[in-house]
Image (spheres, rainbow, N blue to C red):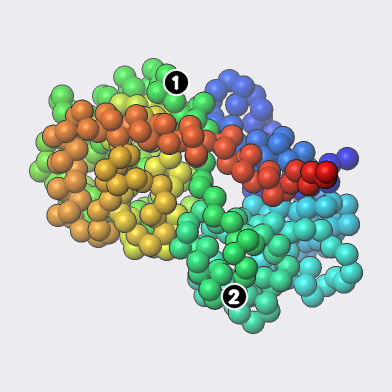
Amino acid sequence: MNDVLLTVSGNIPADIDAQIAARQRPLADYIAMANTFHADLIDYQKARQQTGPFGKLVEKLAGANAMLAWACYKNRHKYRVIFTDGEQIGIPFATLLKFASGGKRPLHFSIGHILSVGKKMLFFDRLKIQSHIDRFFVYATWQKQFIEDRWQVPDERVVFTPFMVDDDFFAPAQAGPAQKTLRALVPGDVPIICAVGLEFRDYPTLMAAVKGLNVHVIIAAASPWSKRADSTEGQEIPANVTVQRFTQFELRDLYAMSDFLVMPLYDVNFQAGVTALLEAMAMGKAVVCSRTPGQTDVVVEGETGLYVPPEDPRALREAIQYLLDQPELREQMGQNGRRRIEQEMSLACYVERLNAYVNPAPLKTR
């Protein structure tokens, strides 16, 4: 029996293995983590099966994430480590560990996406549940510093780890036939740039920046997990901008046919936009990104892309025009970005980095 339990805050598709094998989607991070950690997976569906009528009541009153946390609590004596895939599970699970149980408990490791918001901070400020999260894994150095300073959590318990991408799926050689269909979206023979995602995307600034430029912008305003509104809605869409949704399979070809990616962000303190940035870099593309407090850890200025101030159409326009005028530079940036992914930010690197904490190597004895 495995001694690690890994949560999936969603429902694992029944055909996910077939989709991955057919190269219709990237390898899911939780599958790679489970294989390397030697972990059992528990998603909403499995949690419902394990918690029965009481779990159904918890879900009705507090939501599916609380129900999943309750399932983890019920399983706490079966595992050495319980790894929660985000604070949406980690906070209620840590609360249960602190106030509803005593004695021996498993190690609790949790990914922290953004803990610097009001309702989440209350659990740490007032209930002191940080005592029952043995390690926080964060994707932004700003979040690491915030957790350490506000709650006096020791440095070794807050681990910054770069985010990741499946660089076997998102690879230049994998680009396929959808490019022809996507190209039909663009009138004339003009350069193409793309912008992808929903989470805190500042598309009004991007559209103001590119209006009248000799370039066509394709905005893929969708996300498999973000609940944010599409900031293009209610806006006047310039003639050289197309807004459309794409599958991950189509996104890969969108990156391939684009000259580079633009990531316009509002001023946030967590890693909004990181998935699209890494996917584009894995596809060998330069990137232009808003420099926000939370988004400073991915782009290497002048080497893999360019940073611009957030919500500044003029600066963004100048950066876009600069890369349009420098094809050799953006090609080199794309190559540098792909290399950085392979060396530091691939899914394999990410999983091995976390596994060093989940399954630490035994100390050598003389």
User: Which dot marks residue 84?
Assistant: none
Measuring from the top left, give residue 343's x and y in whole percent: 49, 34
The residue shown at (28%, 50%) is 307
Residue type indicated by callout 1: Gln
Quadrant position of the N terminus in the picture: top right
SS of the residue under disc 1: helix
Identify whether 2 is placed above or below 56. Answer: above
Identify whether 125 is placed above or below 185. Answer: below
Image check: 97 left or right of 20? right
Location of mark 2 (residue): 151
Identify whether 12 is placed above or below 122. Answer: above
Question: Do the residues under discs 1 and 2 have CB atoms within 8 angstroms?
Answer: no
- Nearest the viewer among 41 and 221 is 41
Image check: 310 left or right of 4? left
SS of the residue under disc 2: helix
The residue shown at (45%, 44%) is 275
Q: Does residue 232 appear anywhere in the picture?
A: no
Location of mark 1 (residue): 174
Identify whether 333 is placed above or below 293. Answer: above
Image check: 212 left or right of 177? left
